Image (cartoon, helix red, strand yellow):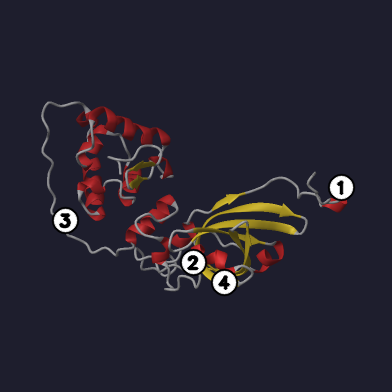
Amino acid sequence: CINNSIYETTVYRDDVYLGLMHIEKLETKLAKEIVEERILHGPYRSLEDFLKRISIGIETLQTLIFIGALRFTGLQKNELLIQARVSLNHFKPEQRLPSFFETPVQAYQLPKLARDRFEDAFDEIEILGFPVSCSPFDLLQTRFRGRVMAADLPQYHKQEVKMLAYLISRKHVPTKKGTMFFGTWIDVNGDYFDTAHFPDNLQKYPFQGGGCYLLLGQVEVDFHFPTITILKMAKMPFIPDPRYADDDKRFETQRKIVEDVSMTQRKPYPQEHEIGLPRLRMTPKK
């Protein structure tokens, strides 16, 4: 929201406002100008007030509208888009100069369009790379949410579990046998857990980008912390994007979910027999 967000993400009590830095198509200079202008001269009162105070192009303005940054106006996105085009088409640079009198804004009677409740989520995925108006689990075609939750994993040591989780990040680890990954996930209850993906398994069940996955693996509990060694996994499809009628486009957006991958550029660590350092048991001194 242009009236609450700053450049970085901030927390106000129980509310989290994403920073303008996360909007990829928004230039850093413009993002900081929006915040500085608001601090100097107060909150933006309307779309027209925003346009008088900030020099912005139609494409960038449309991005702000689609992401919900102008929802404080109380107008639907289609109303804002029409008003934005009309305002910019008739806008003159001298209108940005300070004025003693507030020029009344022409009111337009626009039709109220019905919006699918998930349209905003797909707008967010397209612009931010992840949804914020709903959980990614809400966008899944399946209603299955996992047989075991992350909070219960310590009870399943050495047992196989089937889970459904959203991929947060994965870390690349080079080994003698090939590429290995450690994954960090979150379940539908908001609890985190980790997974291990060995090279032979990754050849059969590779990562397919960000999103939700169905996971099958064996739980290993070390020092009360569980890790799942993955045996099988599959990415789960989202519902069709309600913004499009074209079948080819209705499943494109879910491929735009941002994936956080940490790559390691070092060579694999040598094994003990390669460097002549046998592992010796340490005995405490008396």
| Mark 1 to mark 2 CA distance (whole Å) | 42 Å
Residue 149 tag number: 2
Residue at x-position 27% and y-position 27%:
40
**Tag 1 residue:** 275
Label 4 with label 1: CB-CB less than 8 Å: no
**Tag 3 residue:** 110
> From the viewer's perspective, is the residue at label 3 or at label 1 nearer?
1
| Mark 4 to mark 1 CA distance (whole Å) | 38 Å
For disc 2, the neighbor class at 10 Å (few under 14, some 14 to 19, many from 20) is many
Helix or strand or loop: what does disc 1 sit on? helix
Residue at x-position 13% and y-position 41%:
105
Going from N to C along the chain, the mark reached first, 3 or 2, is: 3
Going from N to C along the chain, the mark reached first, 3 or 4, is: 3
Going from N to C along the chain, the mark reached first, 1 or 2, is: 2
Viewer can see residue 212: no
Viewer can see residue 253: yes
**Quadrant in which the N terminus appears:** top left
**Tag 4 residue:** 161
For disc 4, the neighbor class at 10 Å (few under 14, some 14 to 19, many from 20) is some
> Where does residue 81 sit, x and y in percent of width and height?
26, 50
Helix or strand or loop: what does disc 4 sit on? strand
Q: Amino acid at mark 3?
A: Leu
| Mark 3 to mark 2 CA distance (whole Å) | 47 Å
**Quadrant in which the C terminus appears:** top right
> Where does residue 58 sit, x and y in percent of width and height?
31, 44
Label 4 with label 2: CB-CB less than 8 Å: no
Q: Amino acid at mark 1?
A: Ile
Label 1 with label 2: CB-CB less than 8 Å: no
Q: Is residue 41 above or below residue 252?
A: above
Helix or strand or loop: what does disc 3 sit on? loop
